[in-house]
Image: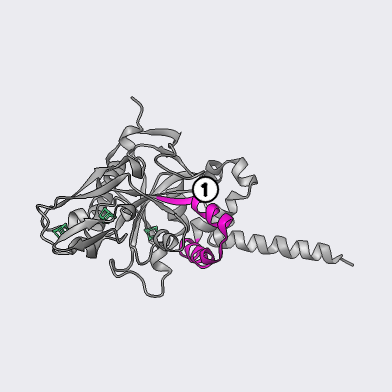
Amino acid sequence: MHSPLLIILLVLLFSLLILWIWIERWHLILPSTIPALKWMGIKRILKGEIVNALLYGRWIPQYVKFLSTITPHLGPRGKAWLENGYHGKILTPDLAKSIITLNQDVPLQSLSERVIPYARARDIVLSAPLDIVISHCGCKTMRAKPCRKFSPPYETCILIGKPLTDYLLEHNPTTCRRISPEEALELLEKFHRSGLVSTGWFKDCIRDQFYVICNCCDCCCLGFESIRRGVRQLTSSGYVAKIDREKCRGCGQCQKSCPFKATQLKGEKSELIWEACMGCGVCVSNCPAGARALVLDEAKGLPLDVRNLTPP
Ligand code: SF4
Ligand code: SF4
Ligand code: SF4
């Protein structure tokens, strides 16, 4: 007779095998999985980060939905875990485009805490020419009533670099497609004009690295939602909006377009709420009078500018 322990073990192993085959889209192993596992490295696999990575890479909307559900119940340690392992740096339109146009290797390095003010997930490495994949937005897809600012299929996540891009394409063929740098630039411009905020994301289970330029709305994005729930998953670009009061016509367009509620009308003129400004630049392109510009502000940290990271 089999012992109950042996039966439990067999059921567990069988369940894990089914889960694995499900992740692999009903294959034993897809070709892109092998380089992805090598890239993760044995240490991260043994630490269990691989489980987080596989679930994220295969079911992004469901993963985001799960985080959105648990976030309100997290205590201080849970909130710190989420912030430190998964966060986005606001990118001005120029900074986002400079990643796509750089066309030079960026050696693997850990960014300063002044750029990424979190305990981990601060690494960056880029290999020219960039391999780029666009994917459906997990945050918008998982909403019952998604975005007011963009229409389906919500292709707003620009993922960068092999072997991650190959893995995502092969494991999510209906929601990802490869694009050229030229198309990526056109899309960034379109996103910016639509009032979306570009954000560079870093994640613990993606080797603690930068891996995607997301283009986010305040209504659906997990990062914005987290801020509202006291989890600081987004950090400033390092810029703030400056207002030329002479040019300002008091039309209120900046107040309507600002995703961080960082601008208000006082009397006939627009005024910045400095503490709330994240330096995204959305108001700059929405001002009909050309009265707004982005200026560096050291008190907001330093920008993520890949042009400063290339070897001399
Ligand atoms: S972070 Fe932004 S673009 Fe990325 S999945 Fe969320 S809302 Fe979509
Ligand atoms: S959009 Fe420009 S002109 Fe209109 S209130 Fe804002 S700063 Fe002034
Ligand atoms: S004021 Fe302008 S730059 Fe600052 S957060 Fe709002 S839209 Fe972005």
Q: Quadrant of residue 141?
A: bottom left
Q: Secondary structure at mark 1?
A: loop
Query: What are the residue bounds of the magenta stretch?
Result: 59-88
Q: Amino acid at mark 1?
A: Asp
Q: Quadrant of residue 55?
A: bottom right
Which image quadrant: the C terminus?
top left
Left or right? Give the position of 175 relative to 265.
Answer: right
List the residue tagged with mark 1: 204
Q: Residues within 10 Å of mark 1 (few under 14, many from 20)?
A: many
Q: Residue at x 42, y 47 (%)?
A: 211
Residue 217 rendering spot, x and y as whole percentages? 33, 62
Q: Is residue 303 visible?
A: no
Camera-side residue of 266 and 226: 266
Residue 21 rendering spot, x and y as whole percentages? 59, 60
**Magenta span has 83?**
yes
In this picture, is 197 found above or below 36?
below
Residue found farthest to the right: 1
Camera-side residue of 311 and 84: 84
Which image quadrant: the N terminus?
bottom right
In this picture, is 34 found above or below 4?
above
